[in-house]
Image (tube, grey):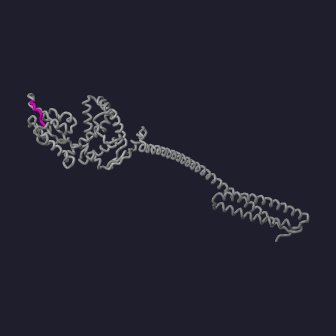
Amino acid sequence: MAKKANLTPQRRQELKDEILEALDNKQNNQIKSITKAKNILKNDLSITDQRPKNFSLNKSKQKISQSLINDKKNLSEIKKFKEEPQGANKKISNSKLKINDNDTATNKNQNNRILKSNLSVKKLIINKDDKNDSLDVFSQLAEKKKQQEKQAKNRWLYLLISSLSFLFLIIAFDILGIYKFNFRDPLSYEVIKIFNLPAGVVNGKKILLSDYYDDLKFLSSALAKKREGLQDLSVFNDLSDKVFYRQVANILVRQKLLNYQKSVSESFLNNQINLLINQSGSVKQAEATIKSIYGLNLSQFKEMILRPLIEKQFLQEAIVNDNSLEINKKAKERAEMILKMALTEGVDFNALASQYTEDEIGVNTGGDFGWVIKEQLDPTWREEVFALQEGQVLPKVIKNKFGYHIIKLEKKVANPDTGKDSVKLRHILIKVDVDQYIKELMDQAVIKKYIK
C-alpha cells in the first residue's frame, strides 16, 4: 500500500498547477489530432464516394472512428476535472499520473499508427487513381479517335449516298425524257447503251433502243440520199414506225430460223465481208464505198445491212422447202397456172414474163436470164433444160431457193473449143414471198412498243 506523501499546501498547489498544465497540453494535442483525423476521414469519405469501397479502406475508417471515441472520453474526463473546485482531488497518486501518461503515450502511438495507415491508404488510392486516370486518358483518346473515324466514315457515306441519289435523279429524268420527249442527245444515247433500254418487245424478245436509234439514223441518211436496195416499208406512215417494225421483222426472222434450226454464223458473215473487200481491192476502198453508199463503217454494215439480208435469204430457202406452208402451196399453184398459159401455142413468152415474173430485173427484160453453161444450173434439172429445142418451154415447174421457175430455151450454141454447149434462157419466177411471210408473222406476233 502506498505511503501518503507529506506535502505542504504550497507544494500541493504547485503539483496541481503542473498537472493542469499537462492536461491542457494533452487536451490541445488531442484536439489537434482529432481535427487532423477528421480531415483525413473527410478526405477518405470524399474519395470513397467516387470510387468503389474496399476492405483496407473500411478497416482504416474503423480505426479512426475508435480513436475519435477514445478522444471524446478523454476530453469529457478533462472537462470534469477542470470543473472540480480547488479543494477537490487533493490526493493524486503517482500511479494515476503514470496511468495518464501511459494513456497519453498510447493515444499518441495509436494516432500515429492511424495517420500512417491513412497515409498509406491515401497513397495506395492516389497511386491507383493515377493509374486509372492514365488508363482513362488513353481510353478517352481511343474512344475519341473511334468517334472521329466514325464521323468521317459517316460523312463519306452521306456524300456517296447524296451523289448516287443525285445521279439517280438525273438518269431517271433522262430516261423519262427518252420515252416521253424523244431525247436523242449524246448523254441520253450513253444511258440507253449502259442500261440496255428497250424500244419494245416482240414475242418476249427485247428490241434494244440503241439498235433502234442506230437504224433510225441510218435509214434517215439513206432516205435522204434516195438510195435503192432498202426494204420497202411504205406500208408504215411514220419513219419511226418504219424503223421500229424493221427491227421487229429482223427479230421475227431470227426466231423463225431457229425453228428451222438455221442461223447466220459470224464466220459466214466475215467471209462475205472478205469477198466484198476482194472485189473492192482493199479494206480502205471497201470502207470508202460502203461509207459513200450507206454512211456506215464495215462493222455497222455487217450488222445493220448484211446480217438481216442474209437471214432473210436463209428464211426464203427454208420456207420454199417447207411444203406444209400455205404460202408455199399458193406460190406453186400460181406457177403451174402461168405454165399452162406459157405452153399455149402462140403465146408471147416475153410478154407473159413481163406481166407475171417476180424477178425485178426480168420485169423489164421479158424474163431474160442470160447465157449459161450446164454447170451453172441446178443439177436436179439442168439436163432437162439442155435437152430442150430452141423456142421450147420446159413442160414442168422447177423449184430452187428463190421459188418456182418456168423456163424457155431461146438459143443453144456449141463451143468448139471447149466442146460445151451454152444456152440462152428466159424465165418467169414466182417467189415464195418471204416478205409476205414475215408480214404474216408480224400479224401473229405479240408486239409492245414503248417509244413514240
Q: Residue furthest bottom?
A: 1
Q: Residue furthest front?
A: 346
For residue 63, what is the image quadrant? bottom right
For residue 88, what is the image quadrant? bottom right
Q: Is residue 359 above or below residue 64?
A: above
Q: Residue at x 25, y 44 (%)?
A: 436
- Image location of residue 218, percent across then percent down: 34, 36
Of 10 and 438, which appears nearest the observer?
Answer: 438
Q: How many marks?
A: 0
- Residue range (magenta): 408-414
Q: Quadrant of the C terminus?
A: top left
What secondary structure predominates along the stretch shown in magenta?
strand
- Image location of residue 125, percent across then percent down: 65, 55
Asked whether residue 98 appears in the rendered view, the answer is no
Of 370 and 203, which appears nearest the observer?
Answer: 370
Asked whether residue 71 appears in the rendered view, the answer is yes
Of 93 and 274, which appears nearest the observer?
Answer: 274
For residue 30, what is the image quadrant? bottom right
- Image location of residue 439, percent across then percent down: 28, 45
Q: Is residue 247 left or right of residue 405?
A: right
- Image location of residue 405, percent across then percent down: 16, 40
Q: Is residue 347 left or right of residue 135?
A: left
